[in-house]
Amino acid sequence: MSLADAKRLIVKVGSALLVDETTGKLRRAWLEALADDIAALRERGTEVIIVSSGAIAMGRRILGLDHRTISLADKQAAAATGQISLSQVWQEALHRNGLVMAQVLVTLEDMEARRRYLNARGTLNALLARGAVPLINENDTVATAEIRFGDNDRLAAKVAHMISADMLVLLSDIDGLYTADPRKNPDAELIPEVGELTPEIMGMAGAAPTMYSSGGMVTKLQAAEIAMKAGCRMMIARGTIYHPLKAQLEGGLHTLFKPSETPLAARRHWIATSLSARGAIVIDGGAERALRAGKNLLAPGIVSLQGSFKAGDAVRVLSAEGAEIARGISSYSAEETRQLMGHNSHDIEPILGFSRGNAIIHSDDLVLAGA
C-alpha cells in the first residue's frame, strides 16, 4: 500500500521545515504548497490530521529570545506566544483551499490517562466526521518536564494509535532512513522499506543537524516502533521540497515502515492480550447476535453488570448463562452504564447530561471470544 491508498493520514511537520533557520521567519510559500497537497488528498477521500511543531521556534523570534540559551520558562513563554501565530498561518493556508482547521493541544500524558485519551479520541473522530482538518501540537505551555524538540514524532505516532490511522508521514530534511549519515558518508544507501525494527536498524539513527530540529532519526525510529505496533504504516520522506506529499504520490523516495497487522487487527490484539478486565456486562440474546454480526453493544441489550469499571476500562461481555462472549473497552463507567441499561441510545444525553457516543462498546473496541 502507498500514500494514495491511505484512508486516515497523519502528517507530521517539524519546526525546521516551517521556520527558516537563518532568519527565523516562516516559510509561507512552502506551507501553502503543503496545504495544497493536503487539499488534494482530501479530494481523494483521505482524512488528514496535521501534527505540527513550530510554536516555540516562532515564539522565540517574536519575543527576541536567543536559541542558544533558553530556559524552560522561556520555552513555555515562546510556546504560548508562538502557538497563536502557528495556528493562524496554518488556518490561512488551509482556508485558501476551502478547508476548516481545528486546533487541538495535547500532551504525551493525555495519551496515557484513559479518560483524557477517550475524550481526545472522541473529539478527533468528531472533527474528521465533520470534514475538519485537526491541527495538533504538544501543549508546551503547560509542560512540567524539559521540552525536547522531536517529541512530536512520538506524539504523532501515539495519535495514530489512538485514532487507528493507517498511515503516518514524517516529513524530514532527508529522503528517509539511510545505512549511514548521508551528510558524512557518500556511500550511505537509502533503505526503501523496513518490516522489522531490528537492533541494526535502530542503530542507524544519527544526530539531528539543525538548531530547530533536535529530535533527529532517533525519535523517528521510536515513532516507527509505536506506529508499527498499532498496525499503522509510517513513512519518512523529504519535506524540504515544495509539494512534498504530491511528490510521494508521484513515486518520490522514502522509507516505508510496514507493520504485520492492520490498525484494527492490532487494536483488537491489544484488547485481547494486553488489557485486564475490570468488570463484566451481561447481555441478552439479541445483543449477542448483534455482536456476532459485527455490531456495537448498545444499552437496550444489557441485562446486568458485574464489578466496577471506569470509562476506558476493558470489560468482559457475558451471555445470560455466564459464558464469555467477548471482551472490549467500555465507553461508559459501570455507574453510567447502570443508568443507561435498557434505554434507547437517544436517551443517553438526557439521562447523563453528556454523550460519548451511542455505543456502550464500539465494535472496533470489541473482540469476540476465540477470535
Image (tube, grey):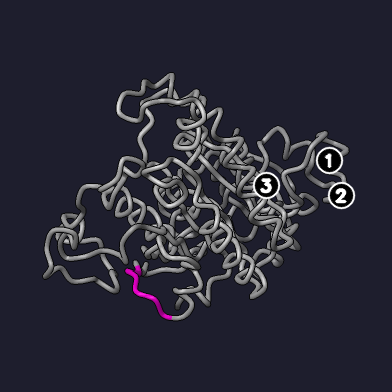
Foreground residue among 76 and 307: 76
Image coordinates for residue 24, horizontal then vertical, percent: 43, 40
Q: Residue at x 52, y 41 (%)?
A: 137
Q: Is residue 32 above or below residue 350?
A: below
Tell me the number on the disc at residue 349: 1
Q: Residue at x 47, y 54 (%)?
A: 12
Q: Are marks 2 and 3 in contact (CB under 8 Å)?
A: no
SS class, disc 2:
helix
Q: Which mark is residue 199?
A: none
**What separation in Å lies between label 2 and label 3 (alpha carbons)?**
27 Å
Q: Amino acid at mark 3?
A: Ala
In the rendered image, the vertical position of residue 61 relative to residue 302, given as above or below: above
Q: Earlier in the sequence, mark 2 or mark 3?
A: 3
Instruction: Give the answer, above or below, for where 213 lies relative to 221.
Output: above
Q: Is residue 371 visible?
A: no
Residue 125 is situated, as x and y percent measured from the top left of the image, at 66, 53
| 254 magenta-colored | yes
**Image check: 101 left or right of 229?**
right
Label whose residue precedes the other's in the sequence (3 or 1): 3
Q: Quadrant of the N terminus?
A: bottom left
CA gap between label 2 and label 1 equals 7 Å
Check if residue 82 falls in the magenta segment: no
Q: Is residue 259 left or right of residue 26?
A: left
SS at mark 1 in the image: helix
* Residue corresponding to mark 2: 346
Instruction: State the SS at label 3.
Output: strand
Q: Using the numbered discs, state the Cα–Cα distance from disc 3 to disc 1 in whole angstroms.
A: 24 Å
Q: Which residue is mark 3?
A: 102
Task: Give how far across and how far down residue 39 sits, in percent.
Answer: 64, 66
Region in magenta? 251-256
Amino acid type of the residue that numbered disc 2 sits on in the rendered structure:
His
